[in-house]
Image (cartoon, rainbow, N blue to C red):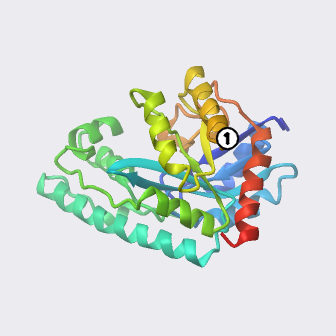
Amino acid sequence: MNTDNIDLHVHSAYSDGTDEPAALIALAAETGLSAIALTDHDTVAGIDEFMAAAEEIPGLQAIPGVEISSHDNGREIHLVGLFVDHHSGVLLEFLDGIQRCRHNRNLQIAEKLDALGYRIDLKSLAVGSNTVVGRPHFAQALIEKYEFTTSGEVFDRLLKRGAPAYVPRYMPPTGEVIRFIHLAGGVAVWAHPIYRDQKERSWARRLLRKMVPEKLDAVEAYYSGFSDYQTQLMLEFAKEFDLAVSGGSDYHGGRYQEVKLGTGDGNLKVPKNLIPALLQRSQRYILAGA
């Protein structure tokens, strides 16, 4: 097993990925990863299966996690929680509230699509183990039932911001998400912080100046699609703001086939030596009771 590389940002079929948690563990072992974190959107429902499967693979560290969307003045900010207690009642209640808001939004999207002549049965979108339905599931259903050929086409014509079937999604404030991650004993990581943004340096510094006092723990410096410049920029910010560093592929299985587990777009290498600093921060919250 290659003990040098890890992947701390991965999605399963419990949210918007296509692989079951146990299959992710098997793929991680096949790929030669030494550690993998399951970070589904707004749910930890797949973690038990994920952790149980990892017990059968000596040398592979499985890390329980979650990805939660937040907002800062209306701008969407994604936070990954690593080493969370996935049985934490406080965290589960918080995620349940977010999922209820998701469901209400999905009802509104379905109504708008129906008014536009696209009838989608909302119940059919939650297939198998999936517990978190979002726009990617609508897009797939529209491709299967209507004349669309790609998810991008569906989003452009119907589902993206400003499109006729778009409905804004409730997102809690960034500081609130960080607090609930800590209450579950986890570390809060700013995910893909400068992905597809203009004026990246000033944007990241401005947000960090706000999130660090809110007890942000780490930034994702290694990410699929990041250039060497972007990775180096986030490593510099981590040092400047005394933050830990994380990284991952944002793997979704067959949904985005160009992104592979562990290697992202083919050039991603997340070093295993990032884990001790992340784990150390998690221990702080566990010992202090957050």
Query: In the rendered image, is residue 241 in sight?
Result: yes
Amino acid type assigned to the residue bearing label 1 in the image:
Val
Q: Does 286 appear above or below 54?
A: below
Left or right: 75 with respect to 286?
left
Which residue is drawn at the image coordinates 42% and 67% (left, top)?
Answer: 98
Q: Does 226 appear above or below 80?
A: above
Quick one: 10 or 253, which is closer to the camera? Answer: 10
Q: Name the residue furthest bottom.
A: 89
Q: Position of residue 204 (x, y in %)?
A: 48, 36
Q: Does 24 appear above or below 194?
A: below
**Which residue does the numbered mark 1 point to in the structure image?**
245
Which residue is drawn at the image coordinates 19% and 44% (left, top)?
Answer: 163
Q: Position of residue 267 (x, y in %)?
A: 64, 24
Which residue is drawn at the image coordinates 77% and 54% (left, top)?
Answer: 280
Q: Position of residue 240 (x, y in %)?
A: 63, 35
Give the quadrant of the N terminus: top right
The image quarter in which residue 56 lies: bottom right
Quick one: 229 or 253, which is closer to the camera? Answer: 229
Q: Position of residue 183 (x, y in %)?
A: 61, 69
Answer few, some or many: residues within 10 Å of disc 1's Cα (few below 14, many 20 plus, some between 14 and 19). many
Quick one: 126 or 193, which is closer to the camera? Answer: 193
Left or right: 179 with respect to 267?
left
Q: Does 222 appear above or below 86?
A: above
